[in-house]
Amino acid sequence: MSRIGALLAVATVLLLTGCAGHRTRPAAHHGSRGTAATGQEAGAPTGAPTGDDRFRDDISRSQADRYSEQADSVPSGPPPDVDKLPEPVPHWEPRSTYGNRSPYTVLGHTYRVLSSAKGYDERGIASFYGNKFHGYKTSNLENYDMYKFSAAHKTLPLPSYARVTNLANGKSVIVRINDRGPFHDNRLIDLSYAAAVKIGIWPKGTGLVEVRAIDPAHPERTPPPAAVVNGQVKTAQPAAHGEPATGAPVPVLGSKPSIYLQVGAFSDASNAERLAERLRAAKLGDVQVIQAQSGGRTIRRVRVGPLPDAEQADVIARRIEAMGLPHPQVAVD
């Protein structure tokens, strides 16, 4: 089969490559392979091995048997000195040939890739991925390197650049987004192992983050990251001449970030209250009805929380679904 034919044959599974699936905190790595000798060089035919022939990346195979490791893990020994690793420099790149199909469906959920990353700014739960995927193809057919500052996102164009800030400590890093995922309902972004270490998401495995896309044409216009001082967080105002190169926290007042699950949004106040009472009766935790403006209309958002961590949010989300309600959306305030 020609290379073009091979690529067409596997086009339908490309969006499942890389970081599909649910990742929890990686276990300590006890195997003999510290760094993977897997994957294929750019331009090689599908399934062509490089390095150790035992580890070949065949993207036409199912997720169950594509990888040489069943569970994700992190390298044994101390983490790398991430302060010595260079952050990617945002610059214009054409959209990748693969990984940008829109809409696409994974695990029963349909996603639409944004036409542009410009202006994207969202808070949510970050996770990370490591050894299992190291050296294997990402969704846009690049080799995943867990020692580079990269990330996976469900809807940002591939490639894109973003600054990711840990809302617990104010540490931030610029990442290049070249993969799809994480396909866990309550996760916003999957960071490479190095990026997770850099901002303190490792070793816990998850954390509350702010993701701000960077306009490669005008990176100096990107607003500065959220500032965190003594556990208090607030989005800082843009500096007069753009973002400081270090992305260092700016001392401002704010509030500690917390996780909420938004179960519904209603223009009718009585509908919102009925749902809130149903959730209160289920004893899921504190239930709030928050009034807000959207598109010139007043809406009432019904939320459960604050919740202590991502794991508890997962538990409560499953209980909400068991009540016959839609899967709630994560909100970080």
Image (cartoon, rainbow, N blue to C red):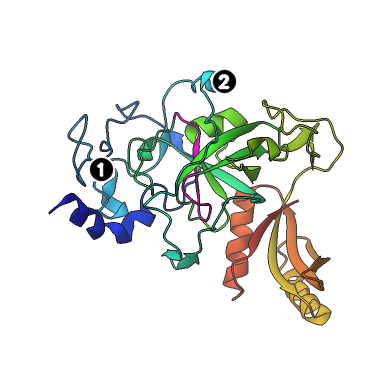
Q: Residues within 10 Å of mark 1 (few under 14, many from 20)?
A: many
Looking at the image, residue 173 lies above or below residue 190: above
Q: Position of residue 116 (x, y in %)?
A: 56, 54
Q: Residue furthest front?
A: 217
Q: Residue under circle 2?
A: 83
The region drawn magenta spans: 147-159
- Find disc 1 in the rendering and name its residue: 57
Q: Is residue 291 above or below residue 161?
A: below
Label whose residue precedes the other's in the sequence (1 or 2): 1
Quarter of the picture holding the N terminus = bottom left
Q: Secondary structure at mark 2?
A: helix
* Residue 106 numbered mark, or none: none
The amino acid beneath tag 2 is Asp
Which of these two is toward me, 279 or 92?
A: 92
The quarter holding residue 317 reads bottom right
Residue 149 at least partly seen: yes
Q: Where does residue 283 sit, x and y in percent of width and height?
A: 73, 66
Compared across the picture, whether 269 is left or right of 310 comes to right
Given residues 290 and 158, the one toward you in this image is 158
Relative depth, front residue between 326 and 285: 326
Cα distance between the residues tagged 1 and 2:
31 Å
The answer to whether residue 33 is above or below residue 296 is above
Query: CB atoms at circles 1 and 2 under 8 Å apart?
Result: no
Tell me if residue 156 is in the magenta stretch: yes
Q: Amino acid at mark 1?
A: Asp
Q: Residue at x 36, y 51 (%)?
A: 17
Q: Is residue 121 magenta?
A: no
* Residue 174 placement, left or right of 248: left
